[in-house]
Image (cartoon, helix red, strand yellow):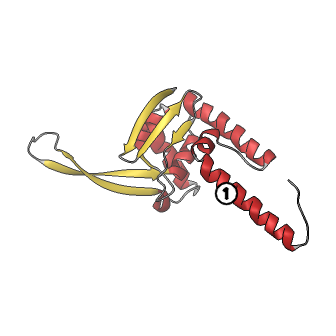
Amino acid sequence: MITKKIMINKELLIYQGKNWEIILKEDSKNETIWASQKQIAEIFDVNRPAITKHLFNIFGDEELDEKVVCSILEHTTQHWAIDWKKQITKTKFYNLDAIISVWYRVNSKKATQFRIWATKTLKEHITKGFTINKNRLQQNYEKFFKLLTDKIYIQLLKKKQQNCFILW
């Protein structure tokens, strides 16, 4: 059950699921997402000044380089006082690295639930050596199965070359 849907741009949606998980539609070209401070605040259910403060500290602590994780985008909007006039507005957008860093600093119920989920996922990855996203696996099952069978086939060829036989 999806509880919240936030439009980031025409190609990216963030969905907040019932388990507080944030499910991201990828920007596969850049392998990241971009969100403004206002959008980040909406995701974590906090006021925008809290996001500004955390980003300031993240850059001040040199946790991230602002030049790498921030992009200023210009967009045209209606002038607030003159109907016929358009104005250009510059807005800073932050990539996924910055969003995650803020996530670990924000004090809200949503951010806390994310940290619980992220810690559980990271622990599973460290102890098992892998993590599986069941939804993505189901969506990409044919591709995953092909990669798996290709890998097994290559392993069999290597074993055959070593005069070893594997029975299935």
Residue drawn at 9 percent across, 40 percent down? 83
Q: Can residue 108 be spotted in the picture? A: no
Query: Looking at the image, which residue sits at the far bottom?
Result: 161
Depicted 123 relative to depicted 153: above or below: above
Q: Name the quadrant containing residue 139.
A: top right
Q: How many marks?
A: 1
Residue drawn at 56 percent across, 26 percent down? 18
Question: What crowding class fits label 1: few (fewer than 14 Cα within 10 Å), some (14-19), or many (20 or more)?
Answer: few
> Where is residue 96 shown, x and y percent of the image?
52, 50
Query: Looking at the image, which residue sits at the far right?
Result: 164
Q: Nearer the viewer, residue 68 or 49?
A: 68
Depicted 157 relative to depicted 94: above or below: below
Depicted 5 relative to depicted 148: above or below: above
Residue drawn at 55 percent across, 30 percent down? 110
Side (left or right) of 55 relative to 76: right
Q: Amino acid at mark 1?
A: Leu
Secondary element type, mark 1: helix
Q: Name the quadrant containing residue 136.
A: top right
> Where is residue 76 shown, x and y percent of the image?
22, 50
Q: Nearer the viewer, residue 83 or 156?
A: 156
Q: Nearer the viewer, residue 132 or 99?
A: 132
Q: Can residue 165 be spotted in the picture? A: yes
Side (left or right) of 111 relative to 90: right
> Where is residue 53 shown, x and y percent of the image?
48, 43
* Residue tagged 1: 147
Residue drawn at 70 percent across, 61 percent down? 150
> Where is residue 41 shown, x and y percent of the image?
45, 37
